Image (cartoon, rainbow, N blue to C red):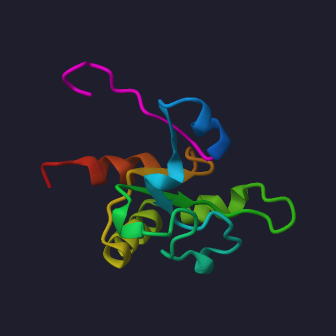
Amino acid sequence: MIKTNQRLVVFTDNKDTVKKENWYHYVWDHAAETHFSVHKAKSFCCDYNRGADDVNDKDLFIFNHFITRKRLGIGRKRKSKKVNTYDFLLQRIQNCQVHTGKIPNFITIDFYSLGNAKADVDFLNDSSR
């Protein structure tokens, strides 16, 4: 990819689409994710959700970090403010890294402007540490 200067990779979670286009990749063949349906801060865990089959063969780790309402599945802004703090999020990421043996490639978060998610990502990406 570097030699040809073509660095775009496109993923989908619709297997039928992948069959139609050879450049389209089924995400769960390459990635595993943590659960995305969490309703309370104490319910966060590092267990895998989708992509968990043959997880050791997956190169990509999607780290889901958001709290949703039970009925509607939409984000909870007030609770997100608490779990998006620098210390809470960083500790969870580090705990999951130890638990899974994988460093998150993607961190998905609701209400990124609440808390310090960008600072956590910057800290994790700092290769000088």
4 in the magenta segment:
yes
Frontmost residue, 76 versus 43: 43
Residue 6, percent from left and from top: 32, 21
Q: Name the outermost residue toward the right.
A: 71
Frontmost residue, 114 versus 122: 122
Vertical placement of 122 versus 47: above or below?
A: above
Q: Name the outermost residue toward the left.
A: 128
Q: Which residues are magenta?
A: 1-14
92 in the magenta segment:
no
Q: Is residue 23 left or right of residue 119?
A: right
Snapshot quadrant of residue 97: bottom left
Query: Which quarter of the figure is the C terminus placed in?
Result: bottom left
- The structure residue drawn at horizontal position 49% and vertical position 69%, both measured from the top left corner, is 53
Q: Name the outermost residue toward the front.
A: 19
- The structure residue drawn at horizontal position 32% and vertical position 46%, both measured from the top left corner, is 122
Frontmost residue, 21 versus 111: 21
- The structure residue drawn at horizontal position 59% and vertical position 68%, both measured from the top left corner, is 35
Snapshot quadrant of residue 80: bottom right
Q: How many marks?
A: 0
Observer able to see residue 125: yes
Vertical placement of 56 versus 115: above or below?
A: below
Main SS category, magenta section = loop
Residue 104, percent from left and from top: 38, 57
- The structure residue drawn at horizontal position 38% and vertical position 51%, both measured from the top left corner, is 105
Observer able to see residue 62: no
Q: Is residue 105 left or right of residue 127?
A: right
Q: Is residue 4 left or right of residue 27?
A: left
Query: Which quarter of the figure is the N terminus placed in?
Result: top left
Residue 7, percent from left and from top: 34, 26
Vertical placement of 117 versus 80: above or below?
A: above
